[in-house]
Structure formats: C-alpha cells, structure tokens
C-alpha cells in the first residue's frame, strides 16, 4: 500500500476511495465488542452479557484517550503531509509514540487501582460485579495494544492509506470470534475472562503488526538532514487537537457511565437489553465517527495545501456518504431491532427484549441527524476548530445526562432513551452552524 494525496482528484471519488476502507475497518473493530457480547450472551447467559455490557461502558473511558491521541496526531500529520513538510511529519510521529507510551502507562496503573470503586460507583448489580471486574482488569492489561494500534491507524489515515490498517483489523477480528468461542467452549469456567483474553490476544497481534508497518512507512519517506525524535513544540501543536478530543471523549464516557448507573437501577434484564441494543447503536455511531475522521484527514491535507474550495466540496460529498451508511441501518434497527438484539441473548426475558426494541425505535430515526453533526465535526477537527467541536459535543452530553435523570422519574427507562435524540438535535444544529461560520472565516483569511 502507498501514501495517498487527498488534495487532488474529484472530492467525492477521493473520499469514497479513502473512507470506505475506514468504514469496513470500523465494522471489524466493532466485531471485537459484538463478538464478546454474542458469546457471553449465547454461551454464558444473560448475567454474563450484562457484565460485559456494564464493563464496556468503562472501557470507553480509556478509549477516549486512545481516540484523542489518534486524532491529534492524525490531523497534524495530515496538515504536514499536505504542506510537504516531511521532516516535521516524522518528528510528529515520533513525538506521538513517546507521549502515548507515557499516557498509557499512567492509565494502566490508575485503571487497575480504581476498577472496583468505579464499578460500585455506577451501581453495578452485585450479581454481575465480579464478572464485570474480571473483564475490565484483563482489558486494562491490554491498553498498550489499544493505544498503539489507534495511533498507528491515525498515522496511516493521515498519509492517505486507509487500507493497510483494514487488513490488520479484519484478520484479527475474525480470529477474535474464533478464539471467543474456543475459550468459552473449552474453558467455560473462565466466564467473561475467556472472552476478555481472546480480545487481548487478537488486539495484541494487530497492534504489533500495525506499529511495525508504520515505522517502515515512515522510514521510506525520504528527508534530508537529522530528524528530531521528540519536540515540545510539536507536542504542543498535537496537544491543541488531542487534549480537546480526549476531554470531549472522556466527558462523553463519564456521561455514559453516569447513564449506565441510572440504567443499572432498573435491574439486570434492563441492563442486558440495553447492553445488546447499544452495541448495535454503537456500530452505527462509530461507523459515522470513523468516516468523519476520514473527512478530518481530507480537510487537514487540503488545508495544508491551501485548497479551501475542496474542503467545502468534501463536506457535501462526505455528508452523502455518511447518509448512505446511516439510512439502511436506521431502517433495519427500527423494524428488526428486537430480533437483532435477541441474537446476543441465550434465553432473553421479555423485559430485556422490550428494552432493546424500545431503545432502538427511539434512537434510530435520528441517525441521519447525527450524520450531519459528525460530518461537520470532521471538517471542524481538520480545520483545528476544536472549541466549536467541543461546544456542540458537550451540549449533547449535558442534555442527555440531565434529561436521563429527569425523564427516568416519570417514564422509567424509556425516559433515558428519549434523552438521546434531544441531545443529538441540539448538537447537530450547533455543529452545522459552526461549520458554516468556520469556512466563511477561513475564506476571508
């Protein structure tokens, strides 16, 4: 695979060629979590599904840091690649890897110490507390794999190559499904630990391969003179993008953990139904976020090359692409959400299935709205307009968390699901407005 210049060619064709492998990658990325839930629910029972789902919300807090480092490095490397500042590009890559190692070490230590208090804080039912803790501890042990894979993936995307990380992830995801089943069948006494160890092994393999290939790719970029291995100036530049992204994703994760705590108060069946349906929901949202990240790389490269007219065309083309992904999934979830959620449960209760169906029927009609927000967010990140990006996201988060508390009183768990589309609509209006304001300002500059 080769590096690809995203500043030439038809914007719609360039984005299609670049983003489709990203979309395929996120499908396989989600297979990790879907496989864990499927195997836990079908082979181990409803309580184990609830334990994996409960632990998953906490893992998203760690993923927030990995995502932020991915975006910070990816946007800056894209801008440098578009401007052909190749020595600085290499310095940005090396600086990111060193910074990632430090952050990952700190989070691993903190995670192992605070796992149990955090699970208790979110009202984890006693029946699933132990299994949630076991699943989380193994996941935390594998954080280096999660972090360095995400950073490597961001670098490949910044260089216009979305296909290389796809192949790593596709192979490891398929292997993860096989290992999940193998561990549970051969060692059923491991419970959620077997599911977690399967993920640990496969993520480790994909991470090691991705890192090796990234350094080979960087070495092949020809530059003259000595390249700095670490730069505080470059770290500050990356941090301008990474820290807001980390904060944004962290607060979203904390918000989801708070919401998970409210959901946990309604019992194991509701938790299991939500765990199954939110996996399906996250498949759509994560897919659109990943395509949005591709739009960020496209925007950043064209900004570095001084081609703002292509940024505007990229927004329109990107929106059509994200809508094409969201629409069929929204229809599928709305009409067949109950049946799809049942796939993850061995002997689901009526309450669990009702919960899953209600959740998906409330949120799925708003996927096209969310698609507009995530496309606009992609452009805003590529333009380094992080304050606008964060404002819209925090509005969504605050509304969802606040309304979950308020609406769960009169409407029980259905009130929690109603808070999602309200937050999405408000945030979409803000993001799209910020997009037009930012592009207009850049045009004047």
Image (spheres, rainbow, N blue to C red):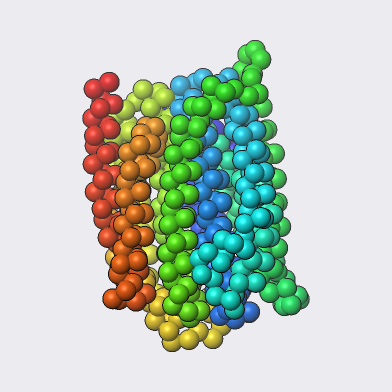
Which quadrant of the structure image shows residue 132?
bottom right
Along the horizontal axis of the image, is 350 left or right of 50? left
Image location of residue 272, percent across then percent down: 50, 76
In this picture, residue 303 sits left or right of residue 201 = left
Looking at the image, which residue sits at the far right? 186
Residue drawn at x 67%, y 43% is 105
Image quarter hosting the N terminus:
top right
Vertical comparison of 303 with 44: above or below: above
Q: Position of residue 188 (x, y in %)?
A: 72, 78
Does residue 23 show up?
yes
In which quadrant of the rendered view does residue 409 lie?
A: bottom left
Q: Quadrant of the C terminus?
A: top left
Would you identify the image quadrant in which residue 58 lies? bottom right
Left/right of residue 258 with respect to residue 414 in the rendered view: right
Is residue 319 shown above or below 52?
A: above
Q: Is residue 357 above or below residue 279?
A: below
Which residue appears at 60% of the width and 52% of the height? 169
Please give the name of the residue rendered at 61% of the width and 72% of the height, measured from the top-left corner: 129
Which residue is pictured at 27% across the width and 32% down the height? 439
Q: Nearer the viewer, residue 389 or 399?
A: 399
Task: Specify whether residue 278 is in view.
Answer: no
Total residue callouts: 0
x and y, in percent, of residue 338 in the image: 41, 78
Name the spot of residue 376 as percent of width and height, x first. Answer: 32, 43
């Amino acid at each position: 695979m080769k590096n690809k210049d995203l500043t030439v060619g038809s914007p719609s064709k360039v984005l299609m060629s670049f983003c489709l492998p990203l979309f395929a990658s996120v499908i396989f990325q989600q297979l990790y979590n879907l496989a864990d839930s499927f195997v836990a629910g079908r082979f181990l029972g409803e309580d184990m599904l609830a334990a994996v789902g409960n632990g998953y919300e906490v893992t998203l807090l760690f993923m927030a840091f990995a995502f932020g480092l991915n975006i910070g490095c990816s946007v800056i490397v894209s801008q440098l690649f578009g401007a052909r500042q190749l020595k600085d590009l290499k310095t940005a890559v090396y600086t990111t890897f060193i910074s990632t190692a430090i952050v990952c070490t700190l989070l691993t230590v903190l995670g192992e110490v605070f796992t149990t208090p955090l699970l208790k804080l979110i009202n984890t039912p006693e029946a699933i507390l132990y299994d949630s803790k076991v699943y989380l501890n193994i996941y935390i042990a594998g954080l280096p794999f999660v972090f360095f894979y995400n950073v490597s993936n961001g670098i490949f995307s910044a260089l216009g190559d979305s296909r290389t990380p796809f192949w790593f992830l596709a192979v490891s995801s398929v292997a993860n499904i096989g290992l999940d089943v193998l561990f549970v069948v051969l060692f059923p006494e491991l419970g959620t630990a077997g599911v977690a160890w399967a993920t640990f092994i496969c993520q480790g393999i994909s991470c090691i391969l991705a890192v090796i290939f990234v350094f080979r790719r960087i070495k092949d970029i020809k530059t003259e003179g000595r390249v700095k291995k670490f730069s505080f100036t470059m770290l500050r530049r990356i941090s301008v993008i990474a820290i807001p992204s980390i904060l944004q994703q962290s607060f979203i994760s904390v918000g989801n953990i708070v919401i998970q705590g409210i959901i946990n108060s309604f019992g194991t069946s509701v938790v299991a139904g939500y765990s199954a349906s939110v996996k399906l929901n996250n498949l759509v949202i994560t897919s659109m976020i990943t395509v949005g990240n591709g739009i960020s790389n496209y925007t950043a490269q064209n900004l570095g090359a001084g081609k703002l007219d292509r940024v505007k065309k990229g927004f329109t083309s990107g929106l059509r692409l994200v809508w094409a992904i969201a629409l069929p999934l929204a229809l599928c979830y709305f009409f067949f959400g109950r049946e799809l959620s049942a796939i993850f449960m061995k002997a689901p209760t009526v309450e669990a299935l009702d919960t899953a169906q209600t959740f998906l029927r409330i949120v799925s009609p708003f996927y096209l709205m969310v698609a507009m927000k995530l496309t606009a967010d992609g452009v805003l990140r590529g333009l380094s307009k992080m304050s606008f990006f964060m404002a819209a996201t925090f509005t969504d988060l605050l509304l969802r968390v606040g309304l979950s508390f308020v609406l769960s009183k009169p409407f029980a768990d259905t009130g929690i699901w109603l808070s999602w589309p309200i937050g999405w609509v408000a945030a979409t209006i803000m993001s799209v407005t910020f997009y037009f304001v930012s592009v207009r300002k850049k045009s004047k500059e």
